[in-house]
């Protein structure tokens, strides 16, 4: 470690410890409460939920501080459920899903631009989101829900020569922090709800450009103003439009309306 790094550790860790001591004094934390807090930290580790806990309570603050002054579209937290090396999709892009994947059909399209507004050909979008039960593929859950197949609703695709892309998927539902684990237990104990509004995660990248980790939300979501992870930004909220024209649906090979 360099002297600078050592100084940084000492500064930040001292600040954290001082704040915790202040809370103990201000709220007269008892021995029982101290013991419960230690047990809680152990339980979080045993359940493998430290990443979930950290990303729910702290990542949005890190993201805001870290992205201050950055140009281009707003970023958002990565969250605990990113898995690298998801399938590379082929056109026309359809996210990996089961034959009878439940949920409303979403056709998500757009243009990837550099911060200066130049459309970027061959930019890559890596997208992942939960299914209609609020479950992410590849993630163990502390309850006996049915798990989707590996890489379900996770995929990578690229923009065309005009920087455009279009991908079909299903609309995720609001995400509830699993009830069976210690993070969910803490939310319940404090009397808070455990939801994030429905969201699409995406990491957009292009050679020669800084990549962007972000999320997209839906404007009529009941949790849009009370995300338990405090990660919603108004400019990341999409408006859904329902399409039910029979000829359009037939041309797309769809047997139900899409958004
Ligand atoms: C998620 O999907 C998520 O994005 C965050 C931040 C926390 C828990 C689940
Ligand atoms: Fe998420």
Image (cartoon, rainbow, N blue to C red):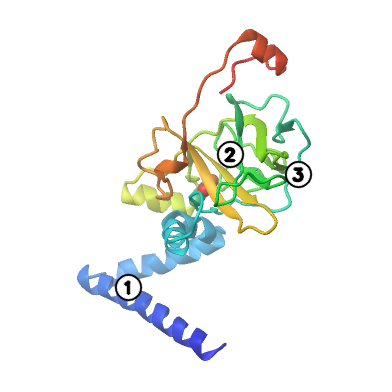
Compared across the picture, whether 37 is left or right of 105 comes to: left
Q: Quadrant of the N terminus?
A: bottom right
User: Where does residue 114 sit, x and y in percent of width and height?
Assistant: 59, 50
At a point 51% along the width and 33% down the height, the residue shown is 173
Mark linked to residue 130: 2
Badge 1 or badge 2: first in the primary sequence: 1
**110 shown above or below 84:** above
Quick one: which residue is furthest to the top in this view? 246
Which residue is label 1 attached to? 20
**244 shown above or below 23:** above
Q: Is mark 2 within 8 Å of ligand 1?
A: yes
User: Where does residue 198 sit, x and y in percent of width and height?
Assistant: 49, 37
Cα–Cα span, label 2 and label 3: 16 Å
At a point 70% along the width and 33% down the height, the residue shown is 97
Q: Mark 2 near mark 3, Cβ–Cβ under 8 Å? A: no
Q: Residues within 10 Å of mark 2 (few under 14, many from 20)?
A: many
Label 2 sits on a secondary structure element that is loop
Q: Mark 1 near mark 2, Cβ–Cβ under 8 Å? A: no
User: Where does residue 253 sit, x and y in percent of width and height?
Assistant: 72, 17
């Amino acid at each position: 470690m360099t002297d600078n790094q050592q100084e940084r550790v000492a500064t930040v860790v001292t600040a954290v410890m001082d704040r915790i001591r202040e809370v103990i004094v201000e709220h007269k934390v008892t021995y029982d409460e101290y013991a419960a807090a230690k047990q809680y930290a152990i339980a979080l580790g045993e359940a493998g939920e430290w990443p979930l806990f950290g990303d729910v309570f702290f990542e949005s603050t890190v993201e805001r501080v870290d992205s201050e002054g950055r140009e281009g579209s707003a970023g958002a937290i990565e969250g605990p459920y990113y898995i690298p090396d998801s399938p590379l999709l082929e056109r026309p892009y359809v996210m990996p899903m089961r034959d009878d994947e439940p949920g409303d059909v979403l056709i998500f399209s757009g243009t990837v631009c550099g911060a200066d507004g130049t459309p970027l050909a061959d930019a890559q979008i890596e997208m992942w989101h939960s299914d209609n039960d609020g479950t992410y593929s590849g993630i163990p859950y502390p309850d006996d829900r049915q798990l989707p197949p590996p890489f379900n609703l996770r995929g990578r695709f690229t923009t065309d020569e005009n920087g455009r892309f279009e991908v079909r998927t299903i609309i995720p539902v609001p995400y509830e922090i699993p009830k069976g684990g210690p993070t969910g237990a803490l939310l319940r104990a404090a009397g808070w709800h455990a939801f994030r509004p429905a969201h699409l995660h995406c990491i957009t990248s292009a050679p020669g450009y800084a990549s962007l980790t972000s999320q997209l939300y839906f404007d009529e979501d009941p949790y849009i103003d009370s995300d338990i992870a405090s990660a919603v930004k108004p400019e990341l909220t999409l408006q859904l439009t329902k399409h039910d024209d029979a000829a359009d649906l037939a041309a797309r090979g769809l047997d139900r309306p899409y958004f």
